[in-house]
Amino acid sequence: MRKIFAALVVSTVLAGAAQAATVYPLDRATILAGSPFDFKVEFTSVIKPEDVKITVNGQDYKTVLGKEVQFVAEEKNKDKLLGSAVILRGLTLANAGDYKVEISAGSETRTVTWNVYGTGAAPKAKNVIFLLGDGLSVAHRTAARIMSKGMTEGKANARLAMDDLDRMAFVGTSATNAINTDSANTMSAYMTGHKTAVNAIGVYADRTPDPLDDPRVETIAEALRRQTGKSIGIVATSEIEDATPAAVVAHTRNRNDKADVVGMLLDVKPEVVLGGGSAYFLPQATAGSKRKDDKDFINLFKDAGYTLATDKNELAASANANGLLLGLFHPGNLDVTLDREFLKKGTVEKYPNQPGLVAMTKVALDRLSKDQDGFFLMVEASSIDKMSHPLDWDRAVVDTIEFDKAIGLAREFQKANPDTLIVVTGDHTHGVSIIGTVDDEKPGTEMREKVGIYAEAGFPNYKDENGDGYPDKIDVSRRLFLAANNGPDHYETFRPKMDGPFVPAIQNEKKEYVVNEQYKNVPGAVFVQGNIPKSGDSGVHSVDDVVLQAAGPGSEGFKGYMEQSDIYKVLADTFALGSKQTN
């Protein structure tokens, strides 16, 4: 019996060694025909170039790929030897079909199959408006509908704009290296058709330490430039270099390479770029700069023909102008809707004229619609996520209402321009649900006993007497009670945070995140034991599928369960990116 067990162990080890090589693109990758990508093989040992054998569909790779790989004798991470590698940059495959790639070098082998797909010859839509609520979960949508529209006898008093998009799919969000994901991986998959690792954008995450040398894949912006004459717009309430907007154009293993992303934006030159993040445009000598070099990207963008807008007045004045537009309205992320428009908290006193998502989207549509070839516009409501992390649900929901208003604006544009596809989705979810209500009128001082569940929940008493779509107050006497299934140690106060965003945990001398005692003495506050590692200061993303909704030509491609990378296939087919449309 021991001999049999030992033989099984040896065979298992040998089987593992036989699959040691890593290949990019990964097995089951989907690749648009004619779209450039980098091919790389990483071996775990140092090998000789003559030992490397690569075939594609049974033929020598050079016959099919038309190029010869570059051999790298040794890849290193500092002093650690990683092994040999081969790489081929800018590879394209013109013909659709399955490509079986077999690699061997000594005892190391690997086989992967890529699916190369084509598109129709003619576009289905002239324009695509891709609206993404970062972190958008079903609870955010439901809460936004109740808070904005109200509910009577169990029925919503009105519908959100997103409620009437007629196509729907569930989208899996997992990364290539983890079941849980971040914005970088998902948006990169949406914008390239390739799943990748957490924190990676427009690349497959390889083993080398340089985040800018990883195998690249083509972004939708690059594909549009290569195949069409369409304009490109990027709108976000975050830093414009943040993961989601960056994924439209960028290539890096590290989403925090924000200074490099600015250069990548300039390389592609989207016609409209609106958001925060001016600190990464300023040379290091300028106060507030987050660059480590002397490049002045404000002037470089101006030299490239961009008009600069720095507040909502300048943005409004630019609506009817022609040419390239760069709007930078904050050194970092824009203030969230609740603080910016209503409470005047956060940094609003310092930056009082920040535009909102709706204003930015309107200007972008006005500018981009002048292009007779059509356009691709990406709009991100960034702070649904940024307020969900610290468990500040009221701010997250109010930002969801603003997001829905931007969707409504897109729907109005679509009515006048029916050759427009609208896609609305999230990139990942948060572990949040609506539990019921909190009713201040219930007797007693213990806030937990004021939580209404089942029949005791009743309905919230938000009002919108001025008809702007936002509740006149969020700190009403009977309000929605949202709660998370994960987070750090914190105090649940059962109340909106009227003085500024919630800070649930702070770091101690051991670099552990512990409960923020600031909220301890709020009447009725309850200590909540955290359930994530103490290295985390906020709630984390959940692995749940996100909901995608769409309307317009091409929307029939969204259905059932889809991977993030499948979304790009629909976008590519809608725009016929497999077919050259310019001379």
Image: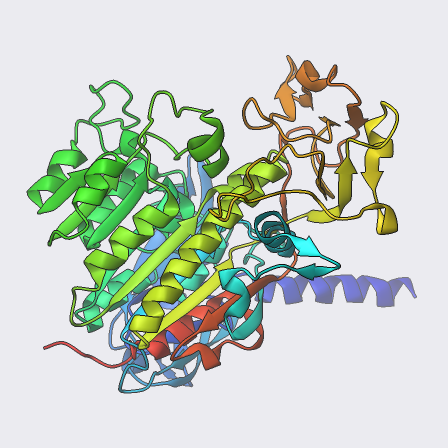
Identify which residue is drawn at 29% across, 36% down: 259
User: At 27% across and 58% down in the image, what residue appears?
Assistant: 365
Q: In terms of image quadrants, where is residue 476?
A: top right
Please determine whether, in this image, residue 515 is positioned above or below residue 230. Answer: above
- Give the quadrant of the C terminus: bottom left
Q: Is residue 68 above or below residue 325?
A: below
- Nearer the observer, 313 or 69: 313
Residue 99 appears in view: yes
Q: Is residue 215 visible?
A: no
Q: Position of residue 231 (x, y in %)?
A: 21, 63
In percent of the image, x 75 and y 32: which residue is there?
530
Of 143 and 442, nearer the camera is 442
Most distant residue in the front direction: 465
Asked which quadrant contains residue 465, the reply is top right
Q: How has the structure been colored for display?
A: rainbow
- Vertical relation: 309 (above or below) 95: above
- Residue located at (11% from left, 35% from top): 299
- Check the image and report above or below for 239 versus 121: above
**In the rendering, at what x and y percent does residue 469 appear?**
50, 49
- Compare residues 246 and 432 and report the one nearer the observer: 432
Left or right of residue 556: residue 476: right
Residue lying furthest top in this view?
Answer: 509
Specify the farthest residue to the right.
Answer: 1
Quadrant where the N terminus sits is: bottom right
Q: How many marks?
A: 0
Residue 255 is situated, as x and y percent measured from the top left of the image, at 41, 43
| Rendered location of residue 288, percent (x, y) | 29, 21
